């Protein structure tokens, strides 16, 4: 390591959090006070996140942090929040201005979500982090425990979880319209960055920009050469740094059904199909089946099949009009007395066949959707002020993200069914797969983040 995890020391800070920083979150913010924000990752999606969540009337941006603050992809965010202090290393940021920060946004690659969130929470900071929550099963588990330990407000960035689709699914389950679900097909069939890489399946060394702090970008992962096949979003296609298509879009497609059908974790994960297999890069297509046990409350045992790849579509449901084409992403839910189709994010469900939507609307049985609710970003800011609770806290987002991680393990190994013990949270029939739940050993100096 070129530097310590924190100048004050992560473990010392974590211990102090329970006695000092834990009193700082929302309880001390008045209704009219603005939330002091620090934004970690301010280029591309991270920059868009920062500019969307940080409104002048509700927040005050005190710090911007990015490993490449000198690159043009960060400049727009810097121009918008020119008065904020600027850092390349999140650890130095917390050292210098931590006392001035109420909350942070994290818009960095999947593999670096964990250390940033853990350090922030240990210092009593509220956290908004992009999806998926983290890169490994263990990281998700620790983040969920840290949220409870430090008593901060946390939100994962699946925006549809604060939209009409969220309230519709919640209320239709309560009203008994979505009940007795036994099977779900979900799919994502858009182009991915790594589909264009041909036979590339090795780490390519390229000249590093003079403004880049590559050591901090790597975070706890082992040394790799700088490459444009990793930076600027390309990391998503590599097993070592991203969670693939499912990690990218699963949180937008499966979030509501996962929470309100109380799916939790599966007892079996089966790779049914895998095309375009590579060692380091995600395959070109995958079909993965999850088996869930009965959960009570009229929720029988069920399975969910995930289809990804340009031409890897699920079967068409009976009664679907021949004129209606599948979108590039969505789900089909087979319930006891009905079949539903939906898309992603804010897209609401529709009955199949189409005629039944008119019948149900005329029947007066459809719950009226609420109006005037906060969006996902407002919800987080209001939660920081103690006025609302986040809708996608880590207690909800972690099990959902762990589902994605289990699928990634199946994609990497390609060895039939993985048996999962829900109580012990262990894969029982494959020692190699079970070791992957923990993920790679962190680089020297980064182990401290894993000591809750």
Image (cartoon, grey):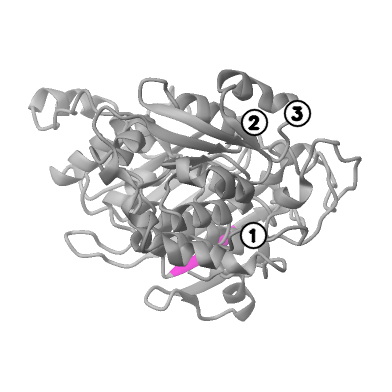
Please give the count of numbered marks on the rendered protein: 3
Tell me the SS state at disc 1: loop
Location of residue 186 in the rendering, given as x and y in whole percent from the top left corner: 45, 45
Query: What residue did someone put label 3 on?
Result: 71
- Mark 2 and mark 3 lie on one chain; the one further toward the N terminus is 2
Tag 3 secondary structure = loop
| Residues rendered magenta in the picture | 268-272
Rendered residue at 56%/19% (across/down): 80
| Marks 2 and 1, the one that precedes in the sequence | 1
Question: Which dot marks residue 212?
Answer: none
Which residue carries the number 2 mark? 43
State the CA–CA distance, disc 2 to disc 3.
9 Å
Q: Taking the image as drawn, is residue 123 in sight?
A: yes
The picture places residue 130, in percent across and down from the top left corner, at: 51, 42
Q: Which residue is mark 1?
A: 5
Q: Looking at the image, which is closer to me, 219 or 99?
A: 99
The quarter of the picture where the N terminus appears is: bottom right
Mark 2 and mark 3 in contact? Answer it, CB < 8 Å.
yes
Compare residues 321 and 27 and report the one nearer the observer: 27
- Residue under the point 61% across and 51% down: 91
Classified by dominant secondary structure, the portion drawn in magenta counts as strand
């Amino acid at each position: 390591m070129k530097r310590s995890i924190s100048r004050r020391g992560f473990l010392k800070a974590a211990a102090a959090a329970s006695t000092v920083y834990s009193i700082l979150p929302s309880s001390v913010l008045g209704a009219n006070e603005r939330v002091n924000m620090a934004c970690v990752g301010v280029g591309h999606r991270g920059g868009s996140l920062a500019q969307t969540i940080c409104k002048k009337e509700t927040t005050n941006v005190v710090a911007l942090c990015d490993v490449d603050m000198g690159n043009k992809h960060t400049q727009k965010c810097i121009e918008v929040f020119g008065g904020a202090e600027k850092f390349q290393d999140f650890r130095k940021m917390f050292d210098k201005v931590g006392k001035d920060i109420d909350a942070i946004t994290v818009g960095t690659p999947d593999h670096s979500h964990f250390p940033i969130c853990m350090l922030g929470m240990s210092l009593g900071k509220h956290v908004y982090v992009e999806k998926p929550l983290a890169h490994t099963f263990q990281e998700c588990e620790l983040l969920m425990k840290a949220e409870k330990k430090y008593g901060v407000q946390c939100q994962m960035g699946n925006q549809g979880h604060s939209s009409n689709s969220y309230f519709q699914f919640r209320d239709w389950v309560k009203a008994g319209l979505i009940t007795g679900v036994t099977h779900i097909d979900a799919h994502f069939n858009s182009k991915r960055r790594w589909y264009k890489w041909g036979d590339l399946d090795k780490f390519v060394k390229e000249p590093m920009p003079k403004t880049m702090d590559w050591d901090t970008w790597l975070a706890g992962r082992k040394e790799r050469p700088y490459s444009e096949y990793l930076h600027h979003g390309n990391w998503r296609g590599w097993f070592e740094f991203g969670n693939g298509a499912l990690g990218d879009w699963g949180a937008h497609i499966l979030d509501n059904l996962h929470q309100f059908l109380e799916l939790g974790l599966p007892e079996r994960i089966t790779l049914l199909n895998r095309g375009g297999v590579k060692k380091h890069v995600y395959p070109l297509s995958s079909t993965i089946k999850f088996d869930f046990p009965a959960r009570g409350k009229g929720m029988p045992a069920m399975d969910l099949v995930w289809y990804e790849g340009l031409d890897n579509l699920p079967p068409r449901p009976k009664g679907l009009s021949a004129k209606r084409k599948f979108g590039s992403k969505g789900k089909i839910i087979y319930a006891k007395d009905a079949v539903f189709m939906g898309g992603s994010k804010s897209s609401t469900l529709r009955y199949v066949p189409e005629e039944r939507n008119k019948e149900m609307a005329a029947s007066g049985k459809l719950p009226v959707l609420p109006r005037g609710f906060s969006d996902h970003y407002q919800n987080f800011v209001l939660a920081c002020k103690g006025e609302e609770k986040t809708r996608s806290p880590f207690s909800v987002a972690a099990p959902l993200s762990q589902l994605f991680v289990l699928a990634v393990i199946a994609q990497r190994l390609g060895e039939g069914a993985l048996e999962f013990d829900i109580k012990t949270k262990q894969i029982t029939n494959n020692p190699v797969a079970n070791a992957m739940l923990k993920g790679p050993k962190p680089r020297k100096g980064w182990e401290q983040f894993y000591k809750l």
